[in-house]
Image (spheres, helix red, strand yellow):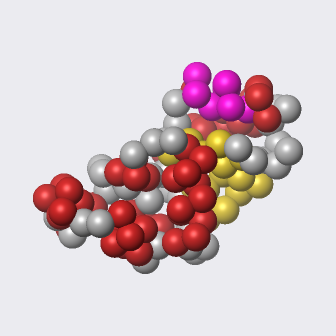
């Protein structure tokens, strides 16, 4: 079972999440979310695996989100348009993003990550 961590190295939450994975002895692969931006296809698959609303995949506290005034625009956008937008810029995607064979968890919530990683072993 391989685990993929999508991260932005300068993000303090990403650093904290990475440290947590290392402390738990969980092997993972890293992927820079900006240099290797998620594709629409990947985003669709991860959204499906997560069982969460698509809005949870947006980095709502990011400058880019505010700059594009997405708080007001997202509710009127189709899911298709949201996938297309997310795929344009890794800074729009909620991070860190923990991905496994049957899970996708946007953001770092220790208890959710612990459950997912335990099931993945």
Number of numbered discs: 0
The residue at the point 14 percent across, 59 percent down is 72
Question: Which residue is nearer to you in this view: 20 or 109?
Answer: 109
Percent x, y for residue 115?
Answer: 67, 25
**Residue 100 seen in this snapshot:** yes
Question: Does residue 5 sit above or below 114 in this rendering?
Answer: below
Task: Tell me, yes or no, whether the highlighted magenta stretch contains residue 115.
Answer: yes
Q: Residue at x 60, y 47 (%)?
A: 49
Give me the residue at 66% from left, 48% from top: 99
Compared across the picture, whether 8 is left or right of 28 comes to left
Q: Is residue 37 visible?
A: no
| Span highlighted in magenta in the image | 111-117
Q: Residue at x 47, y 73 (%)?
A: 87
Q: Main secondary structure of the magenta part?
A: helix
Q: Quadrant of the N terminus?
A: top right
Residue 62 magenta: no
Q: Is residue 71 above or below residue 115?
A: below
- Tell me where residue 33 appears, x and y as whole percent: 56, 64
Name the spot of residue 23 as percent of width and height, x first.
75, 29
């Amino acid at each position: 079972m391989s685990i993929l961590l999508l991260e932005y190295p300068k993000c303090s939450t990403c650093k904290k999440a990475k440290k947590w994975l290392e402390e738990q002895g969980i092997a993972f692969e890293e992927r820079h979310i900006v240099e290797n931006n998620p594709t629409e296809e990947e985003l669709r698959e991860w959204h499906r695996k997560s069982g969460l609303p698509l809005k949870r995949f947006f980095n709502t506290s990011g400058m880019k989100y505010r700059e594009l005034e997405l708080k007001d625009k997202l509710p009127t956008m189709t899911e298709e348009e949201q996938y297309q937008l997310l795929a344009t810029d890794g800074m729009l995607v909620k991070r860190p993003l923990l991905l496994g064979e049957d899970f996708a968890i946007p953001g770092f919530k220790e208890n959710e990550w612990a459950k997912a990683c335990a099931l993945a072993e």
